[in-house]
Amino acid sequence: MIAQFGFGVLVVSFLVALYSVFAAIYGEYKKSPSLVESARRAMLLTWPLLTLTAGVLIYLLVNNHYEVQFVYEVTSRSMPTYLKVTAWWGGQAGSLLFWSWLMSAFTSLVTLRKWDRDREFLPWVIVVSGVTMSFFIGMNLFFENPFAQLYQTFEGIGPHTFQPADSILFTPQDGQGLNPLLRHPGMVIHPPMLYLGFVSFVIPYAFALAALITGRTDDRWIRLTRRWALWAWLFLSFGLVLGGRWAYDVLGWGGYWGWDPVEIAAFMPWLTGTAFLHSVMIQEKRGMFKHWNMLLIILTYSLVIFGTFLTRSGVLSSVHAFAESAIGPLFFTFIGLTLITSVALLIYRWDSLRSETTMTSMLSREALFLLNNLLFMSILIVCFWGVIYPLISELFSGQKITVGPPFYERATGPLFAALMLLMGIAPLSAWGHSTVKTLGRAIWKPAVIAVIITVALFFTYTKNAIALTGFFLVALVILVTVYEYWRGANARQKSQGENIFTAFWNLTGRNRRRYGGYIIHISMMLMAIGILGIELFQVETQGRVAVGESLNLANYTVEYREIASWDDSPKGVNFTRAVVDIYENGVYLGELHPRKDFYFESQQSMTIPGQYATLRDDLYILLIDWEPASVEGATFKIYVNPLVNWLWLGSLLFLVGIVIAAWAEKDPERVTVRAGRRIQQTSAADD
Amino acid sequence: MQINKFMVGGVLILGAVVFLIWSSLNATSEYFLTVNELNEKGSNIVDRNLRVSGAVLGDSIQYDAANLILTFEVAHVPGDNAEIEALGGLAEVLHQAVIDPSRERMKVVYEGPMPDLLRNEAQAIMTGHLGADGIFYADELLLKCPTKYEEAVPEQVVNK
């Protein structure tokens, strides 16, 4: 009964979303503000409706309604309540609903804003988000109904939306439960963050299309959605990083980043989104790259849908793939249609998007931004090629050829290095015009210090050429960025008579995007340190030891003390936990508890490492196997991952940076007058 | 003239990307084969980068925990997704592969911690090379249980 109610509300939401699309189009066509207003209200209504639907589903999940197929598949009695709630997005049907729900929340937020100045955009923003939302709700309605119930008929038991004739409801005693690997706090936050990122990129896209349709192709749409794009980027980035951390903490997923097709699918919109965030600045400051920005946001939207499609369709083999399903082709059709429509619109408006200025200097800020964009696109091409290469090779040669992490590392490595170099140079360049001389004057001090640091590392830390190149670039970018910061604060200190701390604070506050962006650059460098460390310097050992014996790795000694195994019946898990003492150069550091959990109902184990984290490295101990009699000993696999914690530290700083950049400016000192053709000889501290 | 300068730059970058992709593909691409195809080609592909997919035979899993050496066998499953769908889905295909003794099989050796997802009727996607001894030496193991995210309705519920 409750399930049918949920389905009913879903049907209503679908109709309301469709209504808003048609009312908006028809209202615009008839020039009827009241019809458009009713479309807007319909759009506002989708959120409460979908919230109610989601509420019903959560109610069913939490209260063990196993007659509902979805509930039966993703929860079980032994799961704690918070995991039952998160099981909402643990399966396909639920995650599609989750998507629609987020989408409706964002569109409601957008429709609630003041539209006075942008009235002409409103109907089209409603149309674009309404179409997207209808598509996702439709998926739920027609193919992946989360409210389908199990009915016993003469032919057997199966899921049905409506009760078939001569059938009775079938209620299993217990559900199958979420896969143990998903029973992790990561499950609570990683998928929602990625989804938030995915979904919120729909809003800038909707405005871009509205701009193309109405012909109001100035940068108003960019100004309106700048912060949406930043928040979308924040969520997407955070989602990616959390996924990495989750993978690192649970062995089953293998590493922090595996170049798995689905990881790449989430990474691709991030790449275009990052390029977009950079290049919109050029449009705002110089009135250039207008086609390019349109194309980037269209690509980002398509890649967002493509990413969802990849995780759902089972086209590619991946650790993240959901069960295969019929909805793949529909996703593909949807992406195809939206892409064709958007690009057609872009071509139609091509002439009104001409640049207002031309680029003259190869070293000007805008040229370097262009280069930055090209590099992001290059990485995108590599990723895209790697993902589709198996399909293409099969099509043309009949032989499926796949690529793995070595391909991506090799092909993107130099591109990432080039991006880092650019991060070091671009902040020092000026709009309009820079020369080797002006740039050289700005960069030589940081560059010399970076060289000195690199030489010092050569003698003390490593002789690995890749690592040294990487560390040089990291040092250069950090120094340049800090130097820029310091110059800005110093100038402010002199001109405003502020002390240096106030100057720093105000500098950041007055130009949040710029200085938030610098913090992001620094955080990227910290992350690069971590990646270089774990990729190039990881060491490992393994061995079977009896109680009291120890294993040595790097400076660490790991001594096996004891092991205990016990059942936790309510949870349906057996825990086996080893206690090891760790020493560094003979100094006692503490104890770690690597363990293995065994889930009875799914007959699956889960390996949880013991970790000892410092900024220098991460000691990572896995319990592989053990004998009941302690004299026989236990087997451990031990890794030392140098510098990897800089990766996580960098991720935190990264969040700080984006929040600063995306935070509303409290007193906009925004220069809306374009630099135009005026050539600025000065360096960039004054933009 | 200005345009040319930027055009040259763009072409250079494009060239660099094409070169990066091309050279990386040459160095790292892997043939994706089924067990049947692998056995057919046999010694012709010894020491090439390969990726093979198969159904794990639970009884064959042996783990030398002291040395972290894992051996198991996989049975042939079709490589094509459409074919798998036509045969009743991945779970069904894996199940049939494991219970059919006439299927071609392949022995796999992997060194490292035993993956949590390795078990009977899991799909293993292995990257590595075929040794001259006919054993597949895997560097990387990707395991996919069709039941991993969303369990298919189990036997006692679905009636065939």
Image (spheres, rainbow, N blue to C red):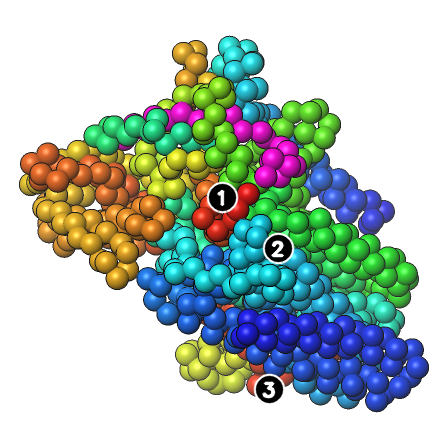
In the rendering, at what x and y percent does residue B137 appear?
Answer: 41, 23
Q: Can residue B89 be seen here?
A: yes
In the rendering, at what x and y percent does residue A68 appear?
Answer: 51, 64
Front-most of residues A512 and B124: B124
Tell me the SS state at disc 3.
Answer: loop
The answer to whether B40 is drawn above or below residue A537 in the figure is above
**Residue under pointer 3:** A667
Q: Residue at x 37, y 70 (%)?
A: A81
Q: Residue at x 40, y 11 (%)?
A: B133
Residue type of the residue flagged with mark 1 = Pro
Front-most of residues A535 and A74: A74
**Residue under pointer 1:** B146
Q: Magenta includes B71?
A: yes
Residue type of the residue flagged with mark 2 = Thr
Residue type of the residue flagged with mark 3 = Asp
Label 1: chain? B
Q: Is residue A322 left or right of residue A81?
A: right
**Residue under pointer 2:** A308
Q: Which residues are magenta?
A: B68-88
Q: Is residue A376 left or right of residue A459?
A: right
**In the figure, residue A214 lies in which quadrant?**
bottom right
In the rendering, at what x and y percent does residue B138 appear?
Answer: 42, 27
In the rendering, at what x and y percent does residue A83 appear?
Answer: 39, 65
Q: Residue at x 61, y 28 (%)?
A: A401
